Image (cartoon, rainbow, N blue to C red):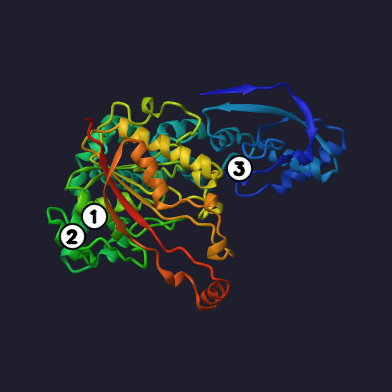
């Protein structure tokens, strides 16, 4: 660990702030401030205070050492203060501030304990010895301070590893995603039977899955994965309360709140489950290249499929099973990146952000914000990439809907150049080497249109859109 010191310089006091997140004391010592202020009035010059460029406010500095001196300068009405700007390398600024809290008034026991706990929460990979060495406490003392935090972290780490392993993610990728060594992952995997013991006991005693999930900090899909292990797909559907649709019309008015996060364009887990039921087998590998809120991964847990999920938004703490990946439209060769050297999926479930629909809810780089031409060009490139990077037996399920610019526009006046219809998707897929095997209707609920809206649409002869389709495709055979 290193610290780089810059030359002492004077800056505006208004540019310096006291950031409580890295301040190790409970309060400013106003008695010392008064003494310092009196010294300043008498012409005494203090050593420069130590500051760091604020990581979120580059025009400001936050105090590492010298909060009482800084307060005294403000109290006497000075507008500039002498500082040394520190550039910390691999050092927690809170830990550095605690180390500098020396002199006539060192940190109290309470302040030391609070600092140790905050430092561990910021960086749980720090050992008790490392923390203790910098704040002047023994390893055992620090270990006692953080024992409960460490236990909670271990449990959370166990749960992440269990979920990722259950989805068939290889150990080396689990280790990379969680920032741990393979040995640590292997050791945790050896404890998985102990991890499930208490939830299984509670379930056997009649507690419901929501009750057990709340008690042990599990997600409901994780518990369903445990409860439904070894059962047939039909029995899994029955246990989950999902009616199994036999025909090619799948009506699901609501999303199952047990599966997936609250997310723009969230889709029903029941729909994903039906795709898995008809077009995959237990333990097959499912690939979701734009995973969003994680509905596909959660449903795979419940139905005993392995799953590999990607999304442009990284939520490592909440969704470690969804790896961060941005499909850069300017990149010419995706094959050399994410799929290289990995197991090829049996089924791809592709539910991209729909063209312009909910565009404001997605990030600036989302394909939902593209122009019509850019959107279709992206899909063309992406479908070709998927075909060239997977096995000949890999199937593709595309979930999408017709897009028509019908807002405030009578049906007769809609302009076709603003529309993207199911036929447009099919043309692109066919050109990319995919052959259509099934078209399944999974319409959106018309209940999203209230009576007043419906009346207005009818008055203006506006034809709304509730269509949604699942296109099932296989790779064209080379003749």
Residue 204: x, y in percent? 15, 64
Viewer-side residue, 202 vs 477 = 477
Contact (Cβ within 8 Å) of mark 1 with mark 2: yes
Between marks 1 and 2, how big is the CA–CA gap? 8 Å
Quarter of the image containing the C terminus?
A: top left
Give the distance between the C-alpha atoms of the residues marked 1 and 3, in whole angstroms: 46 Å
User: Residue at label 2?
Assistant: 236
Residue 247 sits in quarter? bottom left
Judge whether 365 appears above or below 417 on screen: above
Image: 292 above or below 6? below
Of the two numbered discs 1 and 2 on the same chain, state the one appearing first in sequence. Answer: 2
Q: Is mark 3 on a helix, strand or loop?
A: loop
Q: Is residue 270 above or below residue 21?
A: below
Q: Mark 3 points at which residue?
A: 23
x then y, percent, for residue 184:
28, 33
Instruction: Name the residue beneath numbered marker 1.
Output: 302
Label 2 environment density (alpha carbons within 10 Å; few <14, some 14–19, many ≥20)? many
Instruction: Using the image, tell me which numbered label, if any, was put on residue 371.
Output: none
For marks 1 and 3, the one nearer the N-term is: 3
* Structural crowding at the residue carrying mark 3, measured as other residues with C-alpha within 10 Å and reported as few (<14), some (14–19) or many (≥20): many
Residue 144 appears in the rendering: no
């Amino acid at each position: 660990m290193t610290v780089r010191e810059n030359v002492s310089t004077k800056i505006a006091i208004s540019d310096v702030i006291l950031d409580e997140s890295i301040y190790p004391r409970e309060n400013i010592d106003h008695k010392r401030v008064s003494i310092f202020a009196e010294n300043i009035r008498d012409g005494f010059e203090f050593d420069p205070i130590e500051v760091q460029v604020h990581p979120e406010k580059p025009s400001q500095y936050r105090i590492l050492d010298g909060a009482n001196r800084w307060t005294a300068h403000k109290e006497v009405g000075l507008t500039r203060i002498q500082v040394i700007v520190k550039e910390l390398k691999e050092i927690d600024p809170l830990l550095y501030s605690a180390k500098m809290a020396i002199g006539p008034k060192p940190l109290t026991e309470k302040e030391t304990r609070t600092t140790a706990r905050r430092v561990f929460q910021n960086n749980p990979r720090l050992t008790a010895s490392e923390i203790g060495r910098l704040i002047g406490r023994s390893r055992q003392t620090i270990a006692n301070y953080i024992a409960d935090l460490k236990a909670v972290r271990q449990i959370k780490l166990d749960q992440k590893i269990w979920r990722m392993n259950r989805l068939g993610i290889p150990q080396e990728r689990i280790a990379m995603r969680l920032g741990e060594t393979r040995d640590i992952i292997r050791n945790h995997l050896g404890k998985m039977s102990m991890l499930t013991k208490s939830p299984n006991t509670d379930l056997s005693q009649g507690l419901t899955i929501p009750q057990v999930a709340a008690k042990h900090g599990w997600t409901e899909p994780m518990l369903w994965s445990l409860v439904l292990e070894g059962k047939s797909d039909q029995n899994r559907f029955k246990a989950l309360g999902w009616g199994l649709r036999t025909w090619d019309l799948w009506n699901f008015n609501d999303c199952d709140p047990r599966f997936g996060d609250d997310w723009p364009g969230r889709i029903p887990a029941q729909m994903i489950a039906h795709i898995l039921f008809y077009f995959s087998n237990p333990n097959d590998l499912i690939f979701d290249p734009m995973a969003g809120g994680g509905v596909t991964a959660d449903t795979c847990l419940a139905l005993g499929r392995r799953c590999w999920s990607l999304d442009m938004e990284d939520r490592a703490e909440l969704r470690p099973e969804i790896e961060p990946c941005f499909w850069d439209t300017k990149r010419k060769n995706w094959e050399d990146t994410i799929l290289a050297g990995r197991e090829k999926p049996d089924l791809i479930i592709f539910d991209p952000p729909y063209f312009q629909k909910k565009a404001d809810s997605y990030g600036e780089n989302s394909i939902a914000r593209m122009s019509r031409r850019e959107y279709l060009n992206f899909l063309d490139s992406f479908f070709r990439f998927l075909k060239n990077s997977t096995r000949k037996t890999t199937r593709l399920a595309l979930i999408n809907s017709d897009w028509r610019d019908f807002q405030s526009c009578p049906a007769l006046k809609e302009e076709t150049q603003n529309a993207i219809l199911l036929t447009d998707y099919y043309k692109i897929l066919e050109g990319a080497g995919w052959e259509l095997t099934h078209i399944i209707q999974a319409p959106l609920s018309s209940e999203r249109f209230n009576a007043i809206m419906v009346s207005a649409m009818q008055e203006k002869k506006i034809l709304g859109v509730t269509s949604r389709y699942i296109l099932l495709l296989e790779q064209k055979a080379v003749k």
